[in-house]
Amino acid sequence: MEFFNDVGGDPLKPSLFELVAQEQLRDLLQPALKYVLAVFAQRYPRYLIRIVNRHEEFYAFIMFFVERHYLRKHNASFSENFYGLKRRRRPWIATERAIAAVGGIPAGEKLRSREIWRSLFLLITVPYLRAKGQDYYESLGGGIDSDILEDGGSERHIRELTDESMAGVLRRKFKTLYPWFNIGFEAWLLAHNVAYLFDRTPFYRPWLAWIGVDLRRLNMDDFLAQAKPNAISPTKSGFLAVVRRLLLRSPQLLLDSLRLLLPTAIFFIKFLEWWYSPGSPARSLSISPIGPAIPPPQILPPHPAGITIDNTKYGYCPLCKEFIHNATALPSGYVFCYRCVHDHVEQHGNCPITLLPAKAWQLRKVLV
């Protein structure tokens, strides 16, 4: 894993695999937090539903304080510190001491306020903009099968595709150009990764050159400095003084504990997703084999005034008498073509076979 970096004789230069791993950890934090909030929002929707709906802004707000704390105290982002990495202000002249970084980060290479704020801007802004761009692209129907849009696209999507106003033209341009922009951005990052792998650049991300920092592994002196307790200043005794010190230190203690709490929480959440997934072997063990199997519900009988169905033709739509395209089920259990059943429900408001009341929002796509 570290072969490419050890050949050159610089033991503190992190391998590309370490850098990619810390980015993957950072990318896992947002969906993990969103999953937890979504679960609790089902129980407490009055308090959490707004946070879930504005999750990107909430996550950026939280990570601003987390990343700011780690950059100021550890000269690294949260995920970089977790993987034993640090940010070093890039020297104009790479001396032997700067290359080896013996004795930790020299005073002249510690992150200044400018490097911290530039790092914060890119650590928070780039993921936020990419997440919002992807959400907006999907809201415009991007990444959805064209057959689904043609057969059952919502009126909003159809209206946006035919809107000739300036806003409509810009939306269609964005929908067309966004995938190409995303591919170009990923190719740009890949090119820098390859250049870093073969020592063509000291920066595995292009914006690190603008910040003026590079990434290094923590050495023994760094670990000793972190383990060394802070000098205890003379403090006042008394209950109020103790409470005041606890209140002042609790935010830092909480942020420092995230280094262990967040990865543990992510592992626990992923374990729960696996445990409760339909294909999990662990779930099959929880199903007791004792007792008879629960039979499937009986199909509702057709209404005498409804349309007749031919039970000998499997896979055909009862409305158009053709093979079912884009299968969609009603609450009654019968399956039709999406276009056929959508038009019927919009006009008549019932199931064409059982005549039970039905609404368009009750239509369910069937995966076959």
Image (spheres, rainbow, N blue to C red):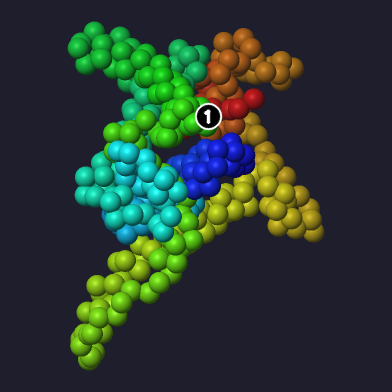
In the image, what residue type sits under mark 1? Phe
Rendered image quadrant of residue 57: top left
Q: Quadrant of the C terminus?
A: top right
Regarding residue 207, the answer to whether it shows in the image is yes
User: Residue 320 vs residue 30: left or right?
Assistant: right
**Residue for point 28% across, 51% down:** 108
**Residue for point 52% across, 32% down:** 197
Regarding residue 31, the answer to whether it shows in the image is no
| Residue 83 at x, y percent in the picture | 49, 52
Residue at the front extreme of this rendering: 96
| Residue 68 at x, y percent in the picture | 29, 53
Residue at the bottom extreme of this rendering: 238
Q: Nearer the viewer, residue 214 or 320?
A: 214
User: Residue 249 vs residue 290: left or right?
Assistant: left
Q: Nearer the viewer, residue 269 or 355?
A: 269
Q: Is residue 140 above or below residue 1?
A: above
Rendered image quadrant of residue 96: top left
Q: Which residue in the structure is indicated by mark 1?
A: 198
| Residue 174 at x, y percent in the picture | 31, 17
| Residue 19 at x, y percent in the picture | 48, 41
**Residue for point 59% across, 38% down:** 7
* Residues packed near mark 1 inside 10 Å, few (<14), some (14 to 19) or many (20 plus): few
User: Residue 348 vs residue 283: left or right?
Assistant: left
Q: Is residue 228 above or below residue 170?
A: below
Q: Quadrant of the N terminus?
A: top right
Task: State the count of labels.
Answer: 1
Q: Is residue 131 above or below residue 151?
A: below
Q: Nearer the viewer, residue 252 or 160?
A: 252
Which element carries disc 1, helix, strand or loop? loop
**Residue for point 29% across, 80% down:** 232
Q: Nearer the viewer, residue 368 or 211?
A: 211
